[in-house]
Image (spheres, grey):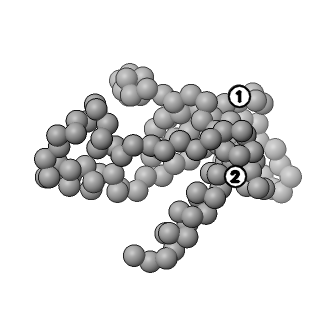
Amino acid sequence: MSDEPQDQNDLADEWAAAMAESMGAEKVELEEFAQDPKVGSSLSEEEQQKLDAILDIPVTISMEVGRSNINIRNLLQLNQGSVVELDRVAGEPLDVMVNGTLVAHGEVVVVNDKFGIRLTDVISQTERIKKLK
């Protein structure tokens, strides 16, 4: 393994610790996914390998402040200092998207001069499936 991912993990851990400390929160140790009773602890070796392969797939997570539809004429007129009105009210929660699918809502926080997001509501799997239909 290269040192780069470990360094990124260390930075992420430090950032999370600083964020938790500034908010009076404490770090929670999560159990391994395979130990979840819903998944079952009796996974075969083959099933465990398949699960491990899926858990290592990278996904893109993005936070959406809002959206706006404008025509190309107005898009081409944008320059430094232009303001684009979004479809959200100030203070409204951000959308947390994973590969373009809404999975949670959250609010912006700042820790050590870096932006982060605190999840305020996680969308249940059944709600996500209903939105697909």
State how many labels appear: 2
Closer to the chain start, of discs 1 and 2, is 2
Q: Which mark is residue 92?
A: 1
- Residue at horizontal 35 percent and vertical 55 percent from the top: 57
Q: Residue at x 43, y 52 (%)?
A: 59
- Mark 2 lies on a secondary structure that is helix
Q: Position of residue 11 (x, y in %)?
A: 61, 63
Q: Residue 29: horizontal and vertical position, in percent?
A: 48, 44
Q: Amino acid at mark 2?
A: Ala
| Residue for badge 2 | 18
Choose mark 1 or mark 2, whichever is in front: 2
Q: CA distance from mark 1 to mark 2?
A: 25 Å
**Residue 52 placement (x, y as % from top left):** 27, 54
Type of amino acid under label 1: Glu
Furthest toward the bottom, the residue is 2
60 vs 91, left or right, is left
